[in-house]
Amino acid sequence: MNSHHMYRLNRVISALLFLSLVAGCTGNASTPPTDPTPAPVDTSPTAEVTQASVNPTLELVADSNILYQDDFTNPATGWPEEKFDNYFIGYHEPEYYHIEITSANYKTTVLEPGKQIVDDAIIEGKVFTVSQKTAAEGDFIYGQVFRRSGDQYYAFTISPRTKKWFVLKSSPNALAVLAEGTEESIHNLDAEDILRVDAQGPNFSFYVNDRLVGQATDADYKSGEVGFYVQTLDAANVHIHFDSLSVKKFDSSPPPNPPVVMLYQDDFTNPASNWPEKKFDNYFIGYHEPEYYHIEVTSANYRTTVFEPEKQSFGDITIEAKTFTVSQKTAATGDFIYGPVFRRSGDQYYAFAISPRAKKWFMIKSSPNALVILAEGTEDSIHDLDVEDVLRVDAQGSKFSLHINEHLVGQVTDADYASGEVGFYVQTLDVANVHVHIDSISVRNFETPLVCNVTALTLNVRTGPGTSFPSDTYLSKDDVIVPIGRNSEGDWIKVKLENGEDLGWIFDSAGYISCSAAIDLLPVISP
């Protein structure tokens, strides 16, 4: 958050704190609305049946892991419908629940009518702003409340106008920001966003549109109610539609990988797929029958790019290319690099390139004014000329994971280019001529394959995340393991074997293991 926006939010929070303190003395409507008192809840062993009668929605829930869900198509589920001086709440038929605030510097919460007490859970909802009923200027935030008891609660909120997210902590004396950040996938007004909180003990993970955007740790509130939160900063009016809300039991096991969706692929056996065939002063491109596409650059200090002929724009993807250098058509001395290009728009793009002679890799960023190296490194698995390498990039938001021959070699963060075309990149450094064959290219939905290879000679596996826990087994070099979670600090990983056998905890270090994806994508779990 820039200093001006942070200053403004702090002033608003201070003002809201003052209002809430005054309201506590005067009964002002700025306090959360008092919902109709629910029927008494039996705490005997048969309480689960009794609670279902309080909350009609629960009778419709077939999945035992779902604690609560509502798509707001049935007003009989009991969410409040009220009008106050500064806001009103209620059903917006046929399928929404709405909260409208009609003044700046104001906030409200609305709680699930069953008033269930929830501790470890996954809370997910779909929500958007109605532009026709919202002031054209000014900022506001909204989202989910969880672990609420009176004035004590946490809230996960977004601002569609600034593309910012905030984790708030409310107490009787303060409203504090625990964490914040920017997320470009947050939609504009009238477009739905999916907000999700994974809460386990003091550890919280926050998602926007299925992307992990942040994490926080706070041990003060262990359980409480769930609901919605809306706050105006300097917007005079805001109208929010909540499309759904679900509360599920927290599951520490990793979510299954999404099914592979092939967005584009070509093995270059069919020239009719229309990749360009042209000859220029310094290079030529075209099909090399029966199964390759080739790019040849015929002078030193030159570079070129070639793009997928349909010119599709891709955002979060896994792009993979198989490629090699033809030694008979390449100068015997001198260096060069080549690899896939992605998120290209005009002169703006990223490229992941390798040098088979130097055994080096480079993450390149092109702009209209510069060509810069974002990251580089050495990888001994890069083959010599005439032998194929598999290059892969996992691109999610501003994070890129780079792979060579199924080895994770580097990770890069850059938020400038969110989407664009894909293709190939070839650059000569001091080589006079280079001929590159591309065997295949595939573009599929973003993948997070959680696999690690042991690189240490031996690696202790402990019963918990720390050296104080005993070690009851060990791993050897080149063992393959599947990480299933991490501790809150992120320095220990819980792992299992590929066959599913649970092992224990290992220390995460670049010198000990090499993983195919960033561990910050793993869920935080307790020992």
Image (tube, helix red, strand yellow):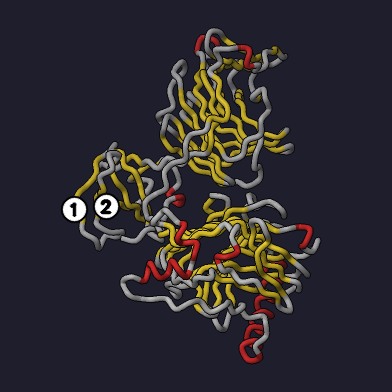
Q: Residue at x 49, y 23 (%)?
A: 322
Mark 2, other Cα within 10 Å: few <14 / some 14–19 / many ≥20:
many
> Is residue 53 something one can see in this rendering?
yes
Which residue is denoted by mark 2 in the rendering? Answer: 504
Residue at (31, 59) in percent of width and height:
465
Using the rendered view, name the quadrant where residue 118 is placed: bottom left
Q: Are marks 1 and 2 in contact (CB under 8 Å)?
A: yes
Left or right of 126 in this view: 326:
left
Please say whether residue 303 is visible from this viewpoint. no
Helix, strand or loop at label 1? It is strand
| Secondary structure category for the residue under label 2 | strand
Quarter in which the N terminus is drawn = bottom right
Residue at the spot x=43%, y=33% of the render?
379
Name the residue at the bottom extreme. Answer: 25
Between 147 and 363, the one lying in front of the other is 147
Tag of residue 472: 1
Q: Position of residue 297 (x, y in %)?
A: 63, 17
Q: Residue furthest left?
A: 472
User: Percent x, y for residue 236?
Assistant: 78, 70
**Residue 288 in the image: x percent, y percent?**
57, 10
Q: Amino acid at mark 1?
A: Asp
Q: Upstream in the sequence, badge 1 or badge 2?
A: 1
